[in-house]
Image (spheres, rainbow, N blue to C red):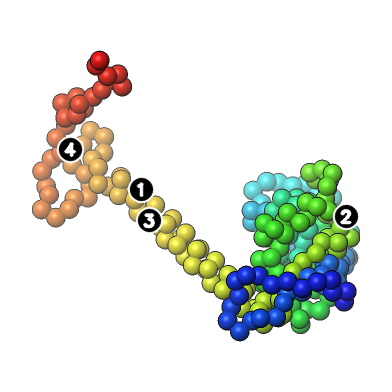
Amino acid sequence: MAKEEKKAPKLRFNGYTNDWEHVKSRYLFKNISSKGFQNLPVLSVTQDKGVIYRDSLDIDIKYDSSTLKNYKLVQPGDFIISLRSFQGGFETSYLTGITSPAYTIFNFIDNQSQNHMFWQYLFKRKNFINSLKKVTFGIRDGKAISFSQFGDVKVEYPDFDEQKHIAITLNKIDDTIQLHERKCEELALIKKALLQKLFPKKDEIKPEVRYKNFSDAWEQRKLGEVADVRDGTHDS
C-alpha cells in the first residue's frame, strides 16, 4: 500500500497514540460489478432513507424488466456511490438486491482490517463530502462519481481497534438521539390529544377531561371583556 503521510485528530480516546494513515481510497477499496441476479428485488438508493426496496417508494418508477440482468448485485455491507453523492456522501446497504448499473458499488479490499461502521460514519462527514467536490469539479447533477475518481480521494483512518471504539461511541449517541426523537413524537401526540380533551368542543361548556375538583362550566365571554385589545398603534 502506498502510504503518503500520517496524521492524528486532536481528540483521542485513552490508550490511542498512533498516527492515522492517510492514503488514496484505491488502496483500501475495490469496485464491485456482479450482474446476472435478475430474480433478486430491485433496490433504490436515496439520501433521506438510504438503500431501500424500490417497491417501498411512494412513487411508481417504471423500468424494463428485461434489463434487470444488467443490474448490479448489492449485499449487506456494500457501499454505494449514488448520483448525488457529492451532496450527501455515500450510502450503505443493509439489504440484498440489485440496483441500476448507473450506481457504483464498492467494498473493502481487506474486510478483516477495517471496521464497517467507522467508514459508514466517515462517508457522511462534511469534510469527506467536501473532498468529493474536488474530484467532481464540473460534474452536473445526475452524473455519478466514478470509482476511479473516488480512488483519487485521500482518506484518513486509524487502526482497527480505534475505528471500532469510535464507531461504537457514535452509534450509542445515534441510539440516544433516536430514543429522544421517539419520546418527542410521543409527547407531541399526547399534547395533540390533550388539546382536544382539555378544551370544550364547539357549542359545549365543559371539556371532556377535567382535573380533580374542577366541575364548573367554562364561562363564555367576548375577548374584549377579558383582555385589553390593541391595534398596534400608540398614543403620542
Q: Which residue is mark 3?
A: 187
Q: Amino acid at mark 3?
A: Leu
Query: Are dots 4 and 2 in contact, CB under 8 Å?
Result: no
131 or 81: nearer the eye?
Answer: 131
**Closer to the observer: label 4 or label 3?**
3
Residue 192: which disc? 1
Q: Residue at x 53, y 68 (%)?
A: 173
Report which quarter residue 217 is drawn in.
top left
Q: Earlier in the sequence, mark 2 or mark 3?
A: 2
Q: Secondary structure at mark 1?
A: helix
Q: Residue at x 27, y 19 (%)?
A: 234
Q: Amino acid at mark 4?
A: Ile
Q: Secondary structure at mark 3?
A: helix
Mark 2 and mark 3: Cα distance apart in space? 48 Å
Q: Secondary structure at mark 4?
A: loop
Up/down of 65 relative to 75, above or below: above
Mark 4 and mark 1: Cα distance apart in space? 20 Å
Residue 182 image position (x, y, % from top left):
46, 60
Q: Which residue is mark 4?
A: 205
Q: Residues within 10 Å of mark 4 (few under 14, many from 20)?
A: some
Mark 1 and mark 3: Cα distance apart in space? 9 Å
Residue 211 visible in the snapshot: yes
Picture quarter with the C terminus: top left
Q: Which residue is mark 2?
A: 67
Residue 106 image position (x, y, % from top left):
81, 67
Mark 4 and mark 2: Cα distance apart in space? 66 Å
Residue 27: which disc? none
Q: Amino acid at mark 1?
A: Lys
Up/down of 179 relative to 138, above or below: below
Q: Residues within 10 Å of mark 3 (few under 14, many from 20)?
A: few
**Closer to the observer: label 4 or label 1?**
1
